[in-house]
Amino acid sequence: MGSYDMLLKPLKIGSVTLKNRMVSAPTSCAELGPNERYSEDNYAYYKLKATGGCAMVVVGDVIVDNSTGRSHPQQVGLDDPGAIPYLVKMADTIHSGGALASVEIDHGGAMCDEDLIDREHAFGPSAMVDAWGDQIDEMTKDDMEYIARKFGEGAAIIKDCGFDMVMIHCGHGWLLHQFLSPLTNKRTDEFGGSIENRMRFPLMVVDSVRKAVGRNFPIDIRISGAERTPGGYGIEDGIRIAEMLDGKVDMIHVSAGTQYDPYSAVLMHPGIFQKPGENSNLAREIKKHVKTPVCSVGAFSDPDFMENFLEEGGADCIAMGRELLADPFFPKKVARGEIGKIRPCIRCGECQSGMMKNGCMRCTVNPLIGREDDFFHPIPVLKKRKVLIVGGGPGGMEAAIEAYNRGHEVVLCEKGSKLGGALYYADGADFKALMKQYRDSQIRKVQELPIKIRLNTCVDAKVVEEEKPDVMIIAVGAKPLILPVPGIKEGVEDGSILFGADITDNTPLGDNVVIIGGGLIGCETAVHTGRMGHHTTIIEMRDDVAVDCGRMHRLNLLHQMDVLDNLDKALGMACTKVEKGAVYAKDADGKEVRYPADTVILAAGLVSDTKTVDSLMGLVPETYIIGDAMRARKVGNATRDAYDAVVSMGM
C-alpha cells in the first residue's frame, strides 16, 4: 500500500479534464420507469456513483434508433422526444454528485429483438440465421448511411442535454462490432474482408458523430481489443482498429469479448477464475500504437494494482463497473488513504445474473444496491437500541457494522474462536481469494469499531440476561445437510467424510476424490481438487450441475470444469451408500455403480440451524432472524437481511 499519485492525477480528454483517473464504466439500469423513462431509482443509482468520487459517470444502454436498434426493453431511445427531459435531469443529477457525465450510445444490430423493432427482421452486416433461429437481414449501404446519421443525431442530443462527453459503443457484439468481427461479417463487398474494409462503417459513424458535435465535444469509443474466442479477431486487429481511430476520437476505451460466444462474454466481465485486470494487456498493447488517451476496463478492484498499471503506462485511466457497485466510494477512499475500508467486489456475477433473470440488480456485498435512494434519504433512526447479534458470519458482521453506523450499541457474540463463519470456505481455493479479502475486510471493520465482541460464546438465556438487549438479531447460519445414506453420518462423525470448507492445499486426498452433490459448492470444490491433480467425480441426482448458480458465474464455472480432463460428472445418480474406499450410487433404472474414493466430500446442501434458533426465540421481545438462520441461501441474502433488520429495529 502506497501513494496513489497516478490514480488521483487529473487527465485531459479533449476539451474536458477528468479530476482523477477513475471512471464509472457504462452499466445498464436494471429496471427503467414507465415507457422506458428514467425513474427516481435510476437517478439515485447513477448519482451514488458520482457522489463516490469517480471522475466521470457513463450512462449505459442508450439507443440511437428505436425503430431498428432495440435489443431489450430497458433502453432509452434518443429519437424519442419524450425522453429528452429525463436525459437532461440525468446529466444534472450526475453533475450534482461531482462527476462529469457521459452517455454510451449504441445500436443492437443483429442482436435486436424482433418484438421491439419496426422491421420484420433485425439487420446486421450479413444475412444469417442466429443462434435463436431468427432471420437476420444484410444491411444495405442506405441502411448504413441511415444508422450513421442516427448516431450523429443522437450524439447531438446528448450534447444538448448537458452531458460532457459521448461514448460510441463499438464492442461486445453490438452493431458496430458486428461489422468488425469475422464471426458476423461475411460480406464480400467494400465493407467486408480486410480489417480496413470492416472498419468502413464504424468510421462512417465516427465521422457522423464528429460532424454533429463539433471538435470541442469529446468522443469516447469503446472497442473490444480482442474477441478472445476461436474465429474472432485478436489483438493484432484490435491494434489496427485503434490506429484507424487515432486522432478521430478523444479517448479509446479498450474492453474485450463478444456476446456471440458464452465464454467470451464471461471474459468480457471476468469472474473469480480470472486474474485482476484480466483484459488490461489489451489496453497496454494498444496504447503503444496510438496517441489518443486509452482507458482500460475489466476486473479492476485493487488500487495498488491499478496504480502500478497506470505508472507502467498500461493506460491513461481505468473504468470500473462492478467494483463501484460493491463500493461506490472506492475513489474517495483511495483519495483519503482509507484503502482498508474499501468493500471489495468478489466478482460473483450476481449483479449481472440478477438483471438477466429478474430484471433487478443486487450486490452480494453491498445491500444498498437496488435501494440507492436510502443513501440520499436515509430512513430515520427514531430510537437508539442495544442490539445483541448472535453469530459472527457474513450476516452477523454486516448487521453489527450497520447497527453501529446507525448509532446503536452493539454486542456481537460468536460461538467459535474467530469471526467470519461460513466465509472460511474461501481459504480452500486460490480462486476464492476475493471472498477471503471481503471476509477479512469485514472482520477488520468490526474489530476497529467500538463493538463489544464476545468470542467462544454460545448465546443462551444466561447471556441474554447478562447483556439485557433491546433487540436480538439471530444470524447463526446453517449446517451441512447430512444425507440419510448408510455410511455418511458415520463418516462425518469419524472425520473420514469431509466438507468443501475442509479442503486446503495440504489436505491429503489421495488419487480419487468423490464429491456427493453437484451444486455450486460441490462444483467449485471439484474445480479445486481437479486442479490439485486428483481425479474427481461429482455424483449429482439431477441431470445437470451448478443449477443454483447465477448465469454468469455458472458459465464460467462450467468452462473451468470442462477443461479439466480429470473431472467426471455422474448425473442422474442417487448416492446409496458410502464405505471405506468407495461410494455407491444408482441411476433412474436402479443400476448401481461403484466409484473408487480415497476421499469423500459431502456437498449436498445446507440446512438452517433451527435448533439454535428455536432455543433463542422468546428471550427478547424484538427478535430478527437473518441469513441462513432463516433459510439456507447465499451471502448476498445474508447481507441484505442484515440491512433490513437494522433499519427496522430503529423505527
Image (cartoon, rainbow, N blue to C red):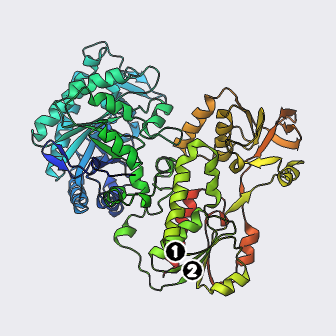
At label 2, the amino acid type is: Val
273 relative to 245 in the view: left or right: right
> Is there CB contact under 8 Å for labels 2 and 1?
yes
| Front residue of 448 and 460 | 448
Residue position marked by numbered label 1 in the rendering: 646
Sequence-wise, which precedes: disc 2 or disc 1?
2
Q: Specify the quadrant of the image occupied by residue 260.
A: top left
- Confirm whether residue 48 shows in the render: yes
The secondary element bearing badge 1 is classed as: helix
Q: Which residue is mark 2?
A: 387
Q: Quadrant of residue 208?
A: top left
The crowding category of the residue bearing disc 2, from other C-alpha atoms within 10 Å (few below 14, some 14 to 19, many at least 20), is: many
Q: Nearer the viewer, residue 529 or 615?
A: 529
Residue 173 shows in this picture = no
For label 1, count other residues whose C-alpha is less than 10 Å away and answer few (under 14), some (14-19) or many (20+): many
Instruction: Identify the residue at horizontal 22%, vertical 56% (top origin).
Output: 91
Q: Secondary structure at mark 2?
A: strand
Residue at 58% in and 57% down: 635
Q: Residue 105: where, in percent of width, then height?
A: 26, 41
Residue 583 falls left or right of residue 198: right
Q: Position of residue 396 (x, y in %)?
A: 59, 68
* Vertical comparison of 461 with 526: above or below: below
Q: Amino acid at mark 1?
A: Val
Q: Nearer the viewer, mark 2 or mark 1?
A: 2
How far apart in space, not on screen, are marks 2 and 1 (Cα)?
9 Å
Numbered mark located on residue 326 in the image:
none
Q: Residue at x 64, y 51 (%)?
A: 425
The mark total stands at 2
> Residue 582 placed where, x, y %?
86, 37
